[in-house]
């Protein structure tokens, strides 16, 4: 008989918990705060900024007879990136050539970009190619585009 009482008690507690949860959801009770304080959450500098800094550092350390080949793979297609335009810290516009040397652009969130970087030697007499990184000029906070 004690086992049956124990089963009823556990079932009752489970039903009470479910009922409380449903009532809280219906009442629209504010979401509970996470146990980890916000200050303890890792601060991400900006993945796009970090990636661009790494590419620039790799390119800066090249010798005169070397070039940094930056590639982007999308499915079966591999693109050689020649230019990275950053309209905002969260968005990259990658420009380069595909296998048939056609100009191709990819607009993608910076957090989704995965680039392959290789340092290669260039043939004597050939100028090495440098990846061009373009970021918008920062505007003063009080200046608007119409104010120009």
Image (tube, grey):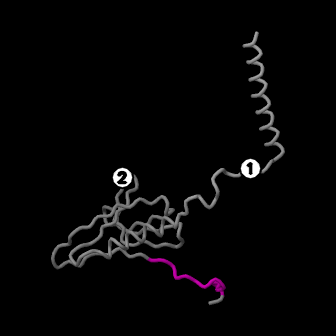
Q: Secondary structure at mark 2?
A: loop
Residue beneath the point at 41% across and 71% down: 53
Q: Which residues are magenta?
A: 134-146
Q: Secondary structure at mark 1?
A: loop
For residue 90, which numbered disc appears in the image?
A: none
Q: Alpha-carbon neighbours of circle 2 within 10 Å: few (<14), some, or many (≥20)?
A: few
Please identify the quarter of the rendering in which residue 65 is found: bottom left
Residue beneath the point at 34% across and 63% down: 71
Percent x, y of residue 2: 75, 12
Please identify the quarter of the rendering in which residue 133 is found: bottom left
The residue beneath circle 1 is: 31
* Quadrant showing the N terminus: top right
On screen, residue 64 versus residue 43, left or right, reads left
Residue beneath the point at 52% across and 73% down: 87
Disc 1 versus disc 2: nearer the observer: 1
Please identify the quarter of the rendering in which residue 51 is found: bottom left
Percent x, y of residue 141: 64, 83
On screen, residue 136 versus residue 74, left or right, reads right
> N-terminal of the two: label 1 or label 2?
1
Q: Alpha-carbon neighbours of circle 1 within 10 Å: few (<14), some, or many (≥20)?
A: few
Percent x, y of residue 99: 31, 61
Q: Foreground: 40 or 73?
A: 40
Picture layout, residue 139 above or below residue 28: below
Residue beneath the point at 73% across and 49% down: 32
The residue beneath circle 2 is: 76
* Quadrant showing the C terminus: bottom right
Q: Marks 1/2: CA distance? A: 44 Å
Picture layout, residue 146 above or below residue 132: below
Q: Main secondary structure of the magenta part?
A: loop
121 inside magenta stretch: no
As drawn, the residue found furthest toward the front would be 2
Q: Foreground: 70 or 5?
A: 5
């Amino acid at each position: 008989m004690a086992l049956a009482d124990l089963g009823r008690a556990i079932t009752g507690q489970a039903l009470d918990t479910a009922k409380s949860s449903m009532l809280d959801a219906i009442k629209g009770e504010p979401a509970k705060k996470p146990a980890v304080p916000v200050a303890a959450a890792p601060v991400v500098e900006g993945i796009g900024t970090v990636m661009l800094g790494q590419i620039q550092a790799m390119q800066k350390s090249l010798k005169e007879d070397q070039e940094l080949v930056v590639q982007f793979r999308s499915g079966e297609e591999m693109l050689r990136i020649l230019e990275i335009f950053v309209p905002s810290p969260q968005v990259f516009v990658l420009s380069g050539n595909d296998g048939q040397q056609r100009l191709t652009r990819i607009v993608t969130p910076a957090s989704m970009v995965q680039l392959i970087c290789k340092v290669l030697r260039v043939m004597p007499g050939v100028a090495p190619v440098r990846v061009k990184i373009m970021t918008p000029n920062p505007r003063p906070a009080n200046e608007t585009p119409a104010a120009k």
